[in-house]
Image (cartoon, rainbow, N blue to C red):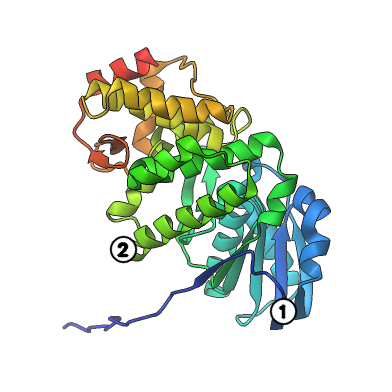
Amino acid sequence: MKVHIDLNKNIDKSYDIYINELESIKYDSKVAIVTNPKVSGLHLKTLLNKLSAKELYIVTVPDGEEYKNLDTISYILDRLNEHRLDRKSLLIAFGGGVIGDMTGFAASIFLRGIDFIQIPTTLLSQVDASVGGKTGVNNRFGKNLIGSFYQPKAVYCETTFLKTLPKREFSAGVAEIVKMALTFDKDFFEWLEKNDLNKEENLIQAIKKCIEIKARVVSQDEKEAGVRAVLNYGHTFAHVIENETNYKSFLHGEAVAIGMVLANNLAMRLGLLDKSEYDRVLNVLKRYDLPTNYPIENIESFYDSFFLDKKSSDKKIKFILLNHIGDYKIADDIDKDTVLAALKDS
C-alpha cells in the first residue's frame, strides 16, 4: 500500500532590499523588535519614529556572539509567548548579524513560522548576513550548526546606522565586501584597491554591489547546494578560529579576514593563486587594519575541526579557494598533508 503526498508547489519567496529608503513602515499586526542594549541605546528611537503597529514590543537580548545560542532563542520565544504574538505577527531584527541570525531562526520556529524583516545596523550584516535567509545559532561544536533557511519579507539597509560603528566593526564588514569581490567580481576588487570605503559615496556603491552579487547567487542556489557555498570563502578556517577562541578574541569579519589569508596560502600551494595576487589581497585587508594571521597551537586539532563544517560531508573537507582573483574553485579532494603543510606555513 502506498499513499502519495504531493508537495510540488511553487511558492514565491521573493523580497526587496532597500538602501536608504526607510521612511516609514506600518503594520496592522503585533510587532516585536529584537535588538540588543547597544543598538537600542544608539538607534531604537530613530526606528520607533518610523514605525507604527497595532501593538509594539521590544525584546532585548545580550550583545555578543557568545550569546548566539539556544538559551537566547528560548528567551526570545518566551517573550513572544508572553506578548501573545500570533501567526499574523511580525518580528524585526534590529542589529548586526548575530541579531539577524537569531531573530530569523526564532521567526522560523515560532508557531511553525511567522514573518520577519531585517533592519541591519552593521556593515557586515548589510552587505552579507541580512540577505539570503540563513538563520541559526552556535553550539559547543561550532558556528551556526543549528538553524534554518528562512527568508525575510524585506531588508532595509540604512547607512546612517553605520556612522556610530566602532572602527573594528566597520573593518569587519569590509572583510565581507572583499570576500564578495575576490570570489565573484575581479573588476570590483580592482575598484576596492583604488577607492576608500571610509568615504560615504564609495561605501554606498560597495554595499549596493555586494547586495547585487549575493542576490544573484541566492536566486540561483537558495539552500547552498552549489554556487552559494562559494560565499563561505574564508569561513571554513574562520569558524574554527572563532570556536577555538570562544568567540571572544575576534569579530566574525576579522576571523574571515584571517580565514581568507589561510585559504589563499593553501591556494598558492596548489598553484591556483600566485604570490602577487596573494599580496594584493593582503594589502587591501591591512589597509583597514584587519588581522591577517592566527597562531595555530595544535595543527592536528585545527584540521580535525574542519569536519564539523556544514559544507563537509562523507569524511571530505570542502574548501572554497580562489582560482585567481575574481574566480573560485570548490575542492574536496585535497590530501591532508597538503592542508597541514599550508597551516604550518601560516
Residue at image location 53% in from the left, 42% down from the top: 139
Callout 1 crowding tier (Cα within 10 Å): few <14, some 14–19, many ≥20: many
**Image spot of residue 243 (x, y percent):** 52, 32
Q: Taking 58 as reference, is 138 above or below it? A: above
**Upstream in the sequence, badge 2 or badge 1?**
1
- The kind of residue on which mark 1 rests is Lys
Q: What element carries label 1?
A: strand
- The kind of residue on which mark 2 rests is Gln
Q: Name the residue under label 2.
A: 220
**Image spot of residue 311 (x, y percent):** 33, 44
Q: Is mark 2 on a helix, strand or loop?
A: helix
- Count how many numbered circles sit on residues in the image: 2
Q: Residue 261, can we see it?
A: no
Residue at image location 65% in from the left, 44% down from the top: 67
Residue 232 lies in quadrant: top left
* Nearest-to-viewer mark from 2 and 1: 2
Q: Taking 202 as reference, is 54 above or below it? A: below
The numbered dot on residue 30 is 1
Residue nearest the observer in this picture, 64 or 120 = 120
Q: Residue 119, can we see it?
A: yes
**Image spot of residue 87 (x, y percent):** 60, 80
Q: Is residue 93 shown left or right of residue 235?
A: right
Position of the C terminus, as image quadrant, is top left
Outermost front residue: 194
